[in-house]
Image (cartoon, rainbow, N blue to C red):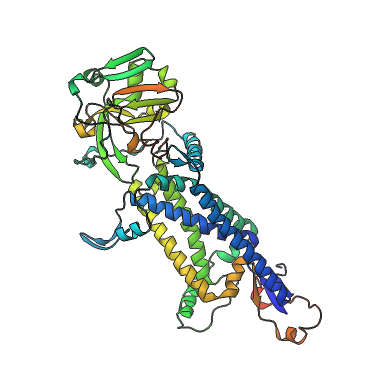
Amino acid sequence: MKRIVKKHPLAIRWFHWLNFPILAVMIWSGMLIYWANDVYKIGWGDKTILKFFPDSFNKALNIPFRLAEGMNLHFFFMWIFAINGLLYVLFLLFSKEWKLIFPNKKSLKEAWFVVLHDLHIRKGLPPQKKYNAAQRIAYTGVIFMGLFMLLTGLAIYKPAQLYWLCYMLGGYEWARIEHFITTILFCLFFLVHIIQVILAGWNNFRGMVAGFEVIPLKKEMIVVADEEPIEPIETPIIKTDE
Amino acid sequence: MMEAKEKIVTAAQVRNKTLLSLFFLFLFMGSSVLTWKWLQKQPKDQGALKPLRKALDVNESIFNGMFSNYHLAKTYPKEMAVAKVRVNGSAGIGDNFDPSAWKLKVIKSPGDTLFISLDEIKKLPKTEIVYDFKCIEGWSQITHWAGVRFSDFVKKYGLDAQAQFQFTGLETPDDEYYVGIDTKSMMHPQTLLCYEMNDAPLPMNQGYPLRLIIPVKYGVKNIKRIGTIYFSSSRPPDYWYERGYDYYCGL
């Protein structure tokens, strides 16, 4: 017998996985566009530590001279990205899932414990619901990054019609830089996310695929495990404040 | 109270539920890849994949609805304009050109054409603008231009009926470069038939004697060395449109 607990609702799983191909196309087409004016770098004065992007990188990915193609893809898939994101946020709000994902008063302090725990400095974690404090901050942050992506993107896309938006973001050139940096942050988020998912293991991953997690049976369940049905028991793991 | 989210099930049930969900995930990822491959194989319409071309046209109608003469490109004080203005593209401004023979040709209707000299254009009210000229490549530059508002030009030469046409076409004298622009954007108060840059006559490589400055569009629509202007109810040919770019290019 296995004891399973619901984790991610079906809608959230769909919103989550849709982002994978959408972001792949958006970032890819964004790179085709960026190439036409690839002026950003990390460095100072004449010193360059990292050029975005090195020529070999562009060549290897076949990026050069595809501006029109990039724009055409970008300005179609932007709608899918925006609609998927909007529906996701609406779902969070109406399903009360937001209570599980938005940080609360304790999150900042507890997130620090999570970091220490993950670095094997501290043992044990504060009690948590679906997400620990660090996850709450990271996942809520990435929602805002998505929103920021849309706003900076719109500001570059229609700087005259949406002059007020462009102004609020520091002008046309700043909006382009912000759009670019947010993309890099998205990629870094993705990298850390993948590593964390691998470290968290199969049971956690299955939560985002099948929607449930297997949790250990209680002692009294094991005794009767081979007999007939057992009443579901309220467990500390899913206990809520309500 | 929260609903009970916990269940006791058999190992086989766990396995079946997992496999079913994994199957759907692979189906989804697989169809994403197939959709991508399908898209890449679509025929092209003016250099752009047909479905994407359609999307661009839908975007055009959406953002065209937002267009207003009161939405202006940001302007700057004159001192902020750069001295060295970037030159990007030389199609249509080749050497086989006689400036002294130039006159702006405005086709009012078949058989009714105006020929207007630079001096006549310069007599019209002069408007200056300092704004960041935006290239479709992604760079921008604060530049200083002067000329006559296209809307003033239309009024002065009695082209109000022509300005009712949805599109305006512009061509270089040698016909090597040509753009089509929605007349609404042409009539925007910041759109200039421009003959001066940085308080001096336009340099040859910036389209002497007359070029278009249209801040609500990307640089590609700011045609240098205008030869002919005409009006049309359908899209006039457009150089970069034919090479896969958006027709509208509106900012």
Q: Find residue A216 and report its image quarter.
A: bottom right
Most distant residue in the right direction: A228
Residue B48 horizontal/vertical position (percent): 44, 41
Q: Is residue B101 above or below residue B21?
A: above
Residue B27 horizontal/vertical position (percent): 61, 59
Q: Is residue A195 left or right of residue B177?
A: right
Q: Is residue B127 left or right of residue B52?
A: left
Most distant residue in the top direction: B111
The residue closer to the viewer here, B214 or B246, is: B246
Residue A175 appears in the picture as rendered: no
Q: Find residue B135 and report its image quarter.
A: top left
Q: Is residue B11 left or right of residue B167?
A: right
Quadrant the N terminus of chain B occupies: bottom right
Q: Is residue B197 above or below residue B21?
A: above
Question: Residue at 68% across / 68% down in the picture?
Answer: B17
Residue B40 horizontal/vertical position (percent): 48, 48
Question: Residue at 41% across / 61% down in the picture?
Answer: A185
